[in-house]
Amino acid sequence: MDHLNEPAPAPVETAGSPVPALPRRVTVLSGGVGGARFLRGLLHRIAGTPGSPTEVTVVANTADDIWVHGLKVCPDLDTVMYTLGGGIDAVRGWGRTEETWNAKEELAAYGVEPTWFGLGDKDLATHLVRTQMLEAGYPLSAVTEALCRRWQPGVRLLPMTDDRVETHVLIDDPAEPSGRRAVHFQEYWVRLRAEVPARAVVPVGLEQSAPGPGVLEAITDTDLLVLPPSNPVVSVGTILGVPGIREAVSSTSAPVVGLSPIVAGSHVHGMAAQVLTAIGVEVSAAAVAEHYGARSTGGVLDAWLVDESDGAAVERVRAAGIACAAVPLMMTDLDATASMVDAALRLLSEERR
Amino acid sequence: MDHLNEPAPAPVETAGSPVPALPRRVTVLSGGVGGARFLRGLLHRIAGTPGSPTEVTVVANTADDIWVHGLKVCPDLDTVMYTLGGGIDAVRGWGRTEETWNAKEELAAYGVEPTWFGLGDKDLATHLVRTQMLEAGYPLSAVTEALCRRWQPGVRLLPMTDDRVETHVLIDDPAEPSGRRAVHFQEYWVRLRAEVPARAVVPVGLEQSAPGPGVLEAITDTDLLVLPPSNPVVSVGTILGVPGIREAVSSTSAPVVGLSPIVAGSHVHGMAAQVLTAIGVEVSAAAVAEHYGARSTGGVLDAWLVDESDGAAVERVRAAGIACAAVPLMMTDLDATASMVDAALRLLSEERR
């Protein structure tokens, strides 16, 4: 552990050490785009290790789910499923490749709100199947399993909960007596493009929710738990907010490693900066680690990777009782992302020596 | 009335007489494609009479409605709405112009039945709006009115009932103990292309249904009631089967004129031949008139137009107490269809002299 007290190692230092093998069971707590891209790199790393027995379970955020035009839409589940199943529009990062938007345009022609939600024609089929199964009484976890039979994402994909949870964001609205108005997270992100300040984040229904089938077991009965560079508030934050999940993460015998979604003082994708500000957390790689907290002090992290540009954060993270290294964290391609997996394994291996 | 006892007049004979003006209120009992095309001709005729005060009400068949992929689809209402609103695919005669089929292909990729139903991406928007309104508690009549605010079909479009009625067709199936199996009308028509014999037609729920709001008034408080060349069994037949509607048609003070959907011993479009056979009615223009029956003997017709190729049917129809003329009944274009309206007015006018 000695070297953990030294200044941030340059990537070349860790890159030189042998990469520990991936354990048999890996569980990842994922949001949408960032988590899905990380998972592709993880599967790429596994595929590059012939005979690797590693099995990946993904516990996905469902708090940005939305009912729209009578259909249940689960953006994070679908982003993971489409990304790993080869159906994602890689440029946008969400929705289906070679998508068309005829139904959406027609809904707008009928004057039906919301007109801003990105409901593609291909994508609609997923929501139709899901909604019909939900209305027939199947829980979301069973529906997700059924959808994955087509997509074969190469991971076991579990919704964090089968209960309805919806993140709302409080924004300024002078027209309201309170001066504030709550909008669905999707409205904040898609319609308002996160361009107005988020004053608070309200995960409606979260406290009353229960972990989905297999979720707690995926956290306690695993060999490695990863917090990918997903949003620490509205993605990983809501997963941890499902009663029982934070406790399971804190007490699992598996090591827990996270990758910073904040690079050089801002998010790479999404609106983490806005929602971190809303909950009073500094927008920095070190502050997010402190927000998650060290498992030794009741938090959820054993180790934390920051980007090479955030080398100065390493000492501060270590001071919080969390092992830390600075490595390239930009998921520019599959190999770059696979290297992040290697760096996480190396960091944990070194921390355990 | 003298000339009604003469042999069938050639079209040139009637074409010479002056065309009576359209009355102020016209009500049409319509199915899908045939009824919609007739209505276009009727509106064309009205538009060609500047200052015409004629208002058209359409009572549309809803017995071929189907719940598919969790959505309520009303083929006949939509065909009338799209046709008169300028959104129809004129070549197919149903569905939207410049349609795409991405959602349908994706649903098939999920392995979700039915894969044979023609659910276009643009069309989907209509079903989404309808389903969401129905699930919010609006009756089908109110939903139809809302959808028509966009399409402005130029007629008042009324579903025959707000209740669920579904026509099923009995077909042969050696695998069943009874040797018969019931399929939804849409499955008989779309999947089986009406290529197997229809052994019986079962309009499930029809006897328990009630006329939709305004339907009986549209029949009793009108100046002309028209049975367009729609299917006499599964379209006009089910409309007349809603308890109260047949009685209203029999007793309205307005004259009732019908146009034969059977030309030269078969249907022009659809599967009237198959379903007429199923109910034991000869497939001929005269037999359909006899099936409807003369109002003077408890039926629903005062007058009946047959195609010029069916001139031999005129005497037989007259013998049933129904005024009859043979005129061109092929709806090849708007003018041809408008001429059918003129012929109907002429026939009624001559019959009343």
Image (cartoon, coloured by chain):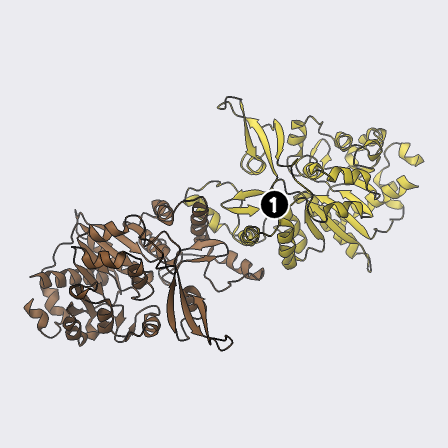
Chain colours: A brown, B yellow
Q: Secondary structure at mark 1?
A: helix
Which image quadrant is residue A236 in?
Answer: bottom left
Which image quadrant is residue B242 in?
Answer: top right
Could one spot residue B334 in this view of the protein? no
Task: Name the residue type under label 1.
Answer: Pro
Mark 1 burial class by Cα count in 10 Å: few <14, some 14-19, many 20+: many
Chain of the residue under the numbered disc 1 shown in the image: B
User: Can you say which quadrant of the picture contains the C terminus of chain A?
Assistant: bottom left
Residue A155 picture location, percent across and down: 27, 50
Relative horizontal placement of residue B173, taking residue A73 as reference (left or right): right
Residue A47 picture location, percent across and down: 21, 51
The number of numbered discs placed on residues in the rendered structure image is 1
In this orientation, which residue lies closer to the viewer: A307 or A218? Answer: A218
Residue A196 picture location, percent across and down: 42, 75
Residue B195 picture location, percent across and down: 58, 31
Determine the residue positioned at 47% across, 53% down.
Answer: A71
In this orientation, which residue lies closer to the viewer: B148 or A214? Answer: A214
User: Can you say which quadrant of the picture contains the N terminus of chain A?
Assistant: bottom left
Q: Pointer 1: what residue?
A: B75
